[in-house]
Image: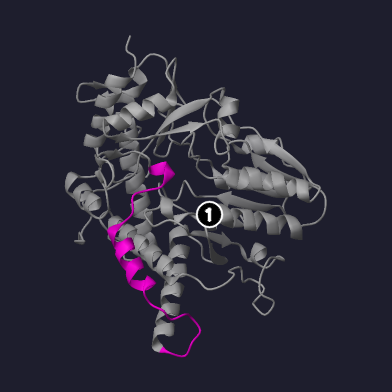
Amino acid sequence: MTTISAPIMSIPQTIPAEGIFLPEELLSQIRGAFLHVDSCPFTGKRAFFENAGGSLTLKSVVERSAEIAGIPDNEHRDNPASHAVSQIVSAGRNDLASFMGASSGVIFGGETGTECLFRVIRAAALSGEEGGSIVASSVEHPATYDATAQWARRTGREWIEVPFDVETGQVTAAHYADCVRPDTRIATILHTSPVTGMSMDVAEIARTIRTVAPECMIIVDGIQHAPHGLLTVDDYDVDAYVISPYKAYCRFNNGYAWLSDRLSVIDHDRLSGKPADAWELGSRDPSALAGVSEMIDYLVWLGGCFTEASTRRACLVAAGQAMRAHERALVHRLLEGGAGLPGLCDYPGVHLIGPGDSPYREGVVSFAVDGVDAKHVVAELGARGIRVHARSDDVFSGNILRPLGLKAVTRISLAHYNSVDEVDACLAALAEVLPRR
């Protein structure tokens, strides 16, 4: 990938409501870095708007992962190959710390982000002081919503559900203030919802929790936020933050959790001879961490197009700002229309989750249409080369859709590699599928 030596565009601190598109030349380079960007190996040409289910994968991630996956040597042996594997693992963890904006604590890997969240919540519940409550919000993914409910029941604690604002699709610090008590042992926060598309103010919610329950273990699901914006774990004052790299341009089947120094040493599953803050069980897959480093190298390159700063962290910050600005522009085009095409908001009977112009929306637009089944919309768009998804009142989304009074929604989810031409193709397809006045 060609490095652009000087900033080609500046991103203001406050991104306008209509967003800012990436320059065409840069977007072309970005799209060239990904596999299957405009064509599915099973169905042919299509626009990929199912990013909330899992992003496109970087070519460099696949190539580097395959290269390292073939190495038979494990860590902690006295040979050059083993030393090289250890360096790959260490570099991957350091890159994850830079990506998350974490200057302390421990990072461990698991099978998935959901598995990491279940493990951390279980350990916190079993090691915490008896009694009290565990708090979660109804806007959360089952990775925390179900895990907190189960471990509250298993440890004989009260499980308190924090409602979210059905008008905005968010849960706020004020909502938590009504539910957290001095004896709250664990509280979970969802950073961004893959259903409502809205991000939450994690730092403000954490401050509110700590005001009432200073010793509460605060655990954040950052899986949906990670591919869309800047992570600054040092600023959140939480105890765990979990991501799934398959939603951030990497391959499937690995998740990573950052743990605070305090949480990292609570009683948890580990080999007896390992350090108190060791969470990984068995050998790490160095090819997965090599892939993570490639992903972060890509974001550093992207950020380098917008800043002359030389540090990886500064470039990651710039990349996050640029990605957010472009995604906001794509969402604005989808909702308001363009090139003579009506926007989603122009159709009668369309009900968006959350305000169309919300500054908290991160790449996801979920909507229901009066008299039209969401799965029908998905199928009709799919037949026209637009890949989207339906979220239903099921194990994954029921706790979110029921308060909204919806049985199902069509979800269009975008990422920074999507183009305005793809959005216009989606708008053209919607014009054939949705009822008009």
State the residue position of label 1.
Answer: 113
Asked if one can make out residue 2 in the rendered structure from this viewpoint, the answer is yes
Q: Residue furthest left?
A: 25
Q: Residue furthest bottom?
A: 78
User: Could you tell me which residue is drawn at 43 percent across and 60 percent down?
Assistant: 99
Residue 269 or residue 29, whichever sits in front? 269
Q: Examine the structure image and report whether residue 261 is included in the region drawn in magenta.
A: no
Asked if one can make out residue 207 in the rendered structure from this viewpoint, the answer is no
Query: Secondary structure beneath disc 1?
Result: helix
Count residues near mark 1 (Cα–Cα under 10 Å), then give few for <14, some for 14-19, many for 20+.
many
User: Could you tell me which residue is drawn at 77 percent across and 50 percent down?
Assistant: 154
Residue 218 against residue 84 in the figure, above or below: above
Percent across and percent down for residue 36 are 27, 49
Left or right: residue 252 versus residue 64 is right
User: Could you tell me which residue is drawn at 44 percent across and 15 percent down?
Assistant: 371
Percent across and percent down for residue 357 are 40, 28
User: Could you tell me which residue is drawn at 36 percent across and 74 percent down?
Assistant: 70
Q: Residue furthest front?
A: 42
Residue 269 or residue 181, whichever sits in front? 269
Percent across and percent down for residue 422 are 25, 36
Percent across and percent down for residue 162 are 66, 36
Q: Quadrant of the C terminus?
A: top left
**Segment colored magenta:** 51-79
Residue 98 against residue 334 in the figure, above or below: below
Amino acid type of disc 1? Answer: Gly
